[in-house]
Image (cartoon, helix red, strand yellow):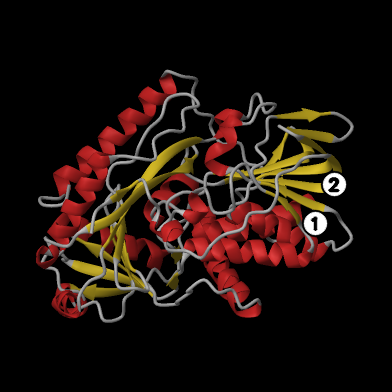
């Protein structure tokens, strides 16, 4: 079975997809949403749900599921992105507690949506296990638990090395933290289910309709190659692609893209599964800076992401392929499970994620209350990005709720510097974090 480089496993093994037509006329809308990922579709759905008479339009530059929402590993966890000690250090105790509760509400929201609307996305509430692969990482994980407990929060259940290895057979695991409030899903099926819900609700979706320019007048005018939308309000939910939109001068440096890389193996045999244990088939993750995350697929493969992120300069978005990182991930998998050393990798792909300079999501208005945006969902963004859509809808409808009062709303994140300083800064940060990983791990690179 040969390696399919640059081919997304979820796309390759999904059902035949029929996209919506592109925009080929000039139309009016009450609300226009740009971006057909989790945030954008959730925003559009919730706008129509809360304001049924409103005309809601969504534009996607490629097809639904093209971006990170259709490429990720499908971890659906109650995490804010950074680890809790770092969040507390950067934003203070109260905001760290609020971020934790927001993340838990986000996961509850996904549970609710899957059950209420019968979303067929292989959603499985199985928890996930965060492991430490060295003594120093073990101390860090124990320190994380202490931070949660000091703030009166449940940070998971600690498992000693022997208990971890009863479940998953790897001599590298020195202990682990089990997070019960987590799930796995099929990201492409899930994003297509969001599309189904939007269409049923009455949202007008146009695919292959890239935004060329946004103009602020009495209404917001959004231009595509063959059509135009005049809207009373605009929501930009493009995440890692936000910097490509013209007409947002002064706001394009709120985020920068980084690239995550993923591999999928061939299906494991019954003997291989027995050799590594993993009876509960939960998600697995270590606690490095550039963490490794591994999950089983429904057909018995292992899907893994992690290692060094890809960087780009300026507006370049052509970093989806990285054979060096793909090989490193294969080596990492063999280090975790030597018995799988001969296991073939059959798919390898990558995709852009959005990172703000202070490593926290940012949501709010751009200039005035007619234009809203969401960006900076990275790392553990599957649940939070969907919940962000509900937040954006309430903000667009000018409601004051617990969500719209969350501290990430209308905060002023530090802007990334102009090029070439931006690229040099990203490269320096990545090198420093990677060096720390190498110093604290002997066998995982």
Q: Along the polypeptide, which appears first: circle 1 or circle 2?
A: 2
Nearest to the eye among marks 1 and 2: give it. 2
Q: Establish if 106 lies above or below 369.
A: below
> Taking 279 as reference, is 210 above or below it?
above
Residue 98 in view (yes/no): no
Q: Quadrant of the N terminus?
A: bottom left
Residue 186, x across and y down, in percent: 46, 66
Look at 42% across and 33% down and name the residue there.
318
Reading the image, the residue beneath label 1 is 399
Q: Position of residue 86 (x, y in %)?
A: 39, 49
SS at mark 1 in the image: loop
Residue 346 found in image quarter: bottom left
Q: Regarding mark 2 in the picture, which secondary structure is present there?
A: strand
Quadrant of residue 143 within the rendered picture: bottom left
Q: What residue do we see at 36% from left, 45% from top?
A: 6
Judging depth in this view, the residue of 145 and 245 nearest the camera is: 245
Q: Residues within 10 Å of mark 1 (few under 14, many from 20)?
A: few
Compare residues 234 and 62 and report the one nearer the observer.
62
Residue where numbered disc 2 is placed: 29
Instruction: Tell me the distance, in whole angstroms, between the alpha carbons under discs 1 and 2.
Output: 20 Å
Number of marks: 2
- Residue toward you, 4 or 191: 4
Other residues around mark 2 within 10 Å, as few (<14) / some (14–19) / many (≥20): some
Q: Are marks 1 and 2 in contact (CB under 8 Å)?
A: no
Residue 4 location (% of width, % of height): 31, 51
Residue at 63 percent of width and 31 percent of height: 245
């Amino acid at each position: 079975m040969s390696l399919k480089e640059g081919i997304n496993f979820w796309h390759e093994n999904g059902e035949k997809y029929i996209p919506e037509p592109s925009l080929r006329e000039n139309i009016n809308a009450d609300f226009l949403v740009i971006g057909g990922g989790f945030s954008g579709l959730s925003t559009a759905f919730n706008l129509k749900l809360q304001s049924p008479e409103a005309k809601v339009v969504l534009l996607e530059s490629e097809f639904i599921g093209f971006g990170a929402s259709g490429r990720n590993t499908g971890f659906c966890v109650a995490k804010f992105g950074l680890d809790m000690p770092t969040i507390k250090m950067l934003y203070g105790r109260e905001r760290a507690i609020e971020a934790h509760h927001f993340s838990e509400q986000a996961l509850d929201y996904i549970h609710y949506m899957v059950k209420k609307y019968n979303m067929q996305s292989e959603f499985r509430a199985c928890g996930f296990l965060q492991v430490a692969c060295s003594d120093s990482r073990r101390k860090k994980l124990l320190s994380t638990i202490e931070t949660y407990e000091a703030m009166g929060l449940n940070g998971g259940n600690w498992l000693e090395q022997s208990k971890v290895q009863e479940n998953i057979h790897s001599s590298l695991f020195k202990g682990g933290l089990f997070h019960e409030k987590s799930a796995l899903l099929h990201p492409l099926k899930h994003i297509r289910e969001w599309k189904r819900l939007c269409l049923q609700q009455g949202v007008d979706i146009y695919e292959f309709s890239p935004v060329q320019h946004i103009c602020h007048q009495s209404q917001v005018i959004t231009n595509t190659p063959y059509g135009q939308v005049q809207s009373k309000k605009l929501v930009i939910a493009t995440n890692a692609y936000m910097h490509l939109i013209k007409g947002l001068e002064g706001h394009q440096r709120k985020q920068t893209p980084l690239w995550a890389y993923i591999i999928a193996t061939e299906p494991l045999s019954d003997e291989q599964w027995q050799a590594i244990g993993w009876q509960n088939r939960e998600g697995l993750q270590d606690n490095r800076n550039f963490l490794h995350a591994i999950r089983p697929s429904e057909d018995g493969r292992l899907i893994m992401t992690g290692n060094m992120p890809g960087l780009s300069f300026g507006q370049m978005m052509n970093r989806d392929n990285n054979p060096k990182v793909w090989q490193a991930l294969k080596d990492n998998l063999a280090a975790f499970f030597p018995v799988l050393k001969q296991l073939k990798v059959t798919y390898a792909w990558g995709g852009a994620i959005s990172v703000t300079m202070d490593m926290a999501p940012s949501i709010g208005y751009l200039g005035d209350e007619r234009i809203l945006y969401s960006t900076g969902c990275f790392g553990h963004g599957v649940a939070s990005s969907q919940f962000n859509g509900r937040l954006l809808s309430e903000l667009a409808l000018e409601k004051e709720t617990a969500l719209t009062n969350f501290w990430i709303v209308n905060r002023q994140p530090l802007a990334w510097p102009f090029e070439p300083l931006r690229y040099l800064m990203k490269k320096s940060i990545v090198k420093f974090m990677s060096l720390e990983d190498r110093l604290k791990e002997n066998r995982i690179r």
